[in-house]
Amino acid sequence: MSKPWHDPRVPPAEQCVLRPLLERHAASMPDKVFARFADGTEWTYRETLAIARRTAIGLGALGVAAGDKVLCWLPNGPDAIRVWFGLNCLGAVYVPINLAYRGGLLAHVVENSDARLIVAHADLLGRLADIDRAALDAAVVLHGAPVDVPGLAVHGPEALAPADGDLPLPVGGVAPWNMQSIIYTSGTTGPSKGVMSSYLQLYSMGTESFPFLGADDRLMVNLPLFHVGGTAAVYAMLALGGSIAVVEAFDTASFWRVVTETGTTCCVLLGVMATFLSKQPPGPQDRNHTLASAVMVPLCEDAAAFSARFGCDIYTVFNMTEVSTPLRSGRNPAPLGTCGRPRGGVEVRVVDENDCEVAPGAVGELIVRTDRPWAMNHGYYRNPEATARAWRNGWFHTGDAFRVGEDGQLFFVDRMKDAIRRRGENISSFEVETEVCAHPLVKEAAVVAVASELAEDEVLVALSVVDDAVLDPAELIRFLVPRMAHFMVPRFVRIVPALPKTPTQKVQKHLLRSEGITADTWDRDKAGIRLRRERLSA
């Protein structure tokens, strides 16, 4: 009798579904450390399974079953990991909440999720008293005394620490295409959207982000577990049988010390983390550490220079909550802004507003599809209109502007909504921000379009400085002139204490655009600094 057909693009459950994967590792290497936490506590694979199993039994006693959505509102640490793993062991759906959410943002996620139970930090629970809680009627409170919230049945930590019990396997088991999580987008242009992700998407995202790692590596998880940067890192090492070092957040001052104390061999440097490290004074910590590699997203620093200084290889990728790392680079890529090339099993196109492919070198929207089923999101929860817009014509539309270089590398240009056009030229806010942040006194920068008194746009940069430094805007312009085309150099400079951000730490450019040219904005035209196109000799 012939064997039943199995699609080779879909790995078996014990390779990509959390419970059978964890059970396999606990049986084959029970004493290997899987997780190390900030206080020095370590969990072996056997202990991780036992803790997840016990948590799942407690959740089951509270009525949680396969397919149920449960909110998790906890900081990075052992409890966040065990609640996530416990939920997935039951076949339930992990729905993490950003720790900064409150008010309308919080109410939207609670209502949209359909959750009846939340597991929350005691310091956060009180925020639920001020909102419409929709179907939410129960809470488990960890890390402190429960807060009374009228209409909410509140349980203490003992609810998730039963002595023992039976952990049933969901009827039919849990398949790679079943929903593993709903993770909410940052909501920079409207209400946050809940991205429905399968086990196979998270597995694909994690393993494709770190193809250079193996079972002997330890990956630092310094991005929040309500963000795919955190969850994909955990899942990558679970799939590989490696280990993780869970820290609450990135901190420039203590970064190298924590790397060495935890035995970290790889990490993700998101946003300006790499810039912050590069702007620290050189010292023995630059090479006295265990870090062998890092994924820098975006590639905002010279990879070769960073590698030479810190003695670790740099890689970069393009990813978002909805996809599974469709683009990635080789070791120490160049030039700045590259996202690498499409990985195997992925098709990408750069298209215009009608989904027609643009000419090589032209800017358009990146769209993606994969040959592995369920390797990308399967829509936005309870938002069919947004799902249809994103998935039109059978491709997922990223909303990101890209161009293809002569050698086939893809370059991130901007979010489509952040594009700037000045004097007939298209300007990438990302490219301008990269050059502004190269100034040693600039901490962070955001570039937006503001209205011109002539036509089209003018360029405004809002920035914060390092260590309360004093930065003369005219000096910044002198720094930028040899680094970029004349039409890209900002006309307006606004120095602020901090850039406005969403709870997911994305810059709220729409607020900067709406505020426009404020009283404290410096204008280089009024300062008499006018830039012209360089005229070439005949």
Image: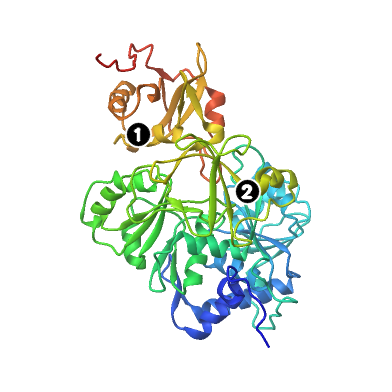
Residue 95 image-quadrant placement: bottom right
**204 or 220, which is in the foreground?**
204
Residue 463 image-quadrant placement: top left
Label 1 sits on what residue type? Glu
Q: Which residue is mark 1?
A: 435
Q: Residue furthest bottom?
A: 1
Residue 288 image-quadrant placement: bottom left
Residue 313 at what x, y percent from top left?
Answer: 31, 57
Residue 173 at what x, y percent from top left?
Answer: 70, 76
- Residue 57 in sight: yes
Visual colour scheme: rainbow
Of callouts 1 and 2, the N-terminal one: 2
- Residue 76 in sight: no
For mark 2, give the secondary structure. Answer: loop
Rendered-image quadrant of the N terminus: bottom right
Rendered-image quadrant of the C terminus: top left
Does residue 30 lie above or below 292 as drawn? below
Q: Which residue sits at x=70%, y=47%?
A: 387
Q: Which residue sits at x=40%, y=59%?
A: 267
Residue 152 tag number? none
Q: Residues within 10 Å of mark 1 (few under 14, many from 20)?
A: some
Label 2 sits on what residue type? Trp
Spatial CA span between label 1 and label 2: 33 Å
* Left or right of 440 in this view: 428: right
Residue 395 tag number? 2
Q: Which residue sits at x=23%, y=58%?
A: 287
Q: Nearer the viewer, mark 1 or mark 2?
A: 2
**522 or 528, which is in the foreground?**
528
Residue 477 at what x, y percent from top left?
Answer: 32, 23
* Left or right of 135 in this view: 169: left
For mark 1, give the secondary structure. Answer: helix
